[in-house]
Amino acid sequence: MAEYGGLASYGPSWYGLGRQAGRLLANVLQGAKPADLTVEVSQQMQLVINLRTAKALGITIPETVLGQADRGIQ
């Protein structure tokens, strides 16, 4: 939601989920039965901070938080 003006968002990486779905689809296309595939949870989480929104709200984001962010939107 940070891309749409929210201050911050934390959740799964949509790119990572797409790659994970691609691996599962490749297994099915190679003959694996869908019922035999293991259940996987997202391995990649992503923290995005919208610095433009923070500035508009007068909020200073600490450097420690910015250092942990995967992406900052200017």
Image: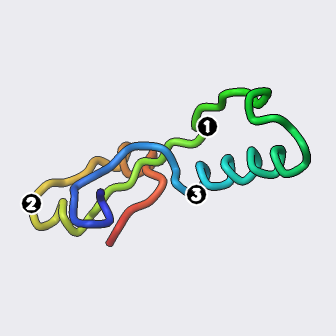
Tell me which amino acid carries mark 3: Tyr
Rendered residue at 72%/54% (across/down): 22
Q: Are marks 1 and 3 in contact (CB under 8 Å)?
A: no
* Image vertical order of residue 35 relative to residue 7, above or below: above
SS of the residue under disc 3? helix
Query: Which residue in the protein does label 1 denote?
Result: 43
The residue furthest left is: 57
SS of the residue under disc 2? helix
Tell me which amino acid carries mark 2: Leu
Please indicate whether residue 69 sits to the left or right of residue 2 in the image: right
Residue 68 pos. (x, y %): 45, 45
Query: Which residue in the protein does label 3 denote?
Result: 15
Where residue 41 sits, quadrant-wise, is top right
Q: Quarter of the image for the N terminus: give it.
A: bottom left
The residue furthest right is: 30
Q: Nearer the viewer, mark 3 or mark 2?
A: 3
Please indicate whether residue 57 sits to the left or right of residue 26 in the image: left
Instruction: Point out the tag, 3 or 2, that comes first from the N-terminus.
Output: 3
Instruction: Point out the tag, 2 or 1, that comes first from the N-terminus.
Output: 1
* Image vertical order of residue 38 relative to residue 44, above or below: above
Frontmost residue, 48 versus 62: 48
Rendered residue at 32%/65% (across/down): 3
Residue 12 pos. (x, y %): 48, 44
Instruction: Point out the tag, 1 or 3, that comes first from the N-terminus.
Output: 3
Residue 37 pos. (x, y %): 76, 31
Q: How is the image coloured?
A: rainbow
Q: Nearer the viewer, mark 2 or mark 1?
A: 1
SS of the residue under disc 1? loop
Q: CA distance from mark 1 to mark 3?
A: 11 Å
Q: Are marks 2 and 1 in contact (CB under 8 Å)?
A: no
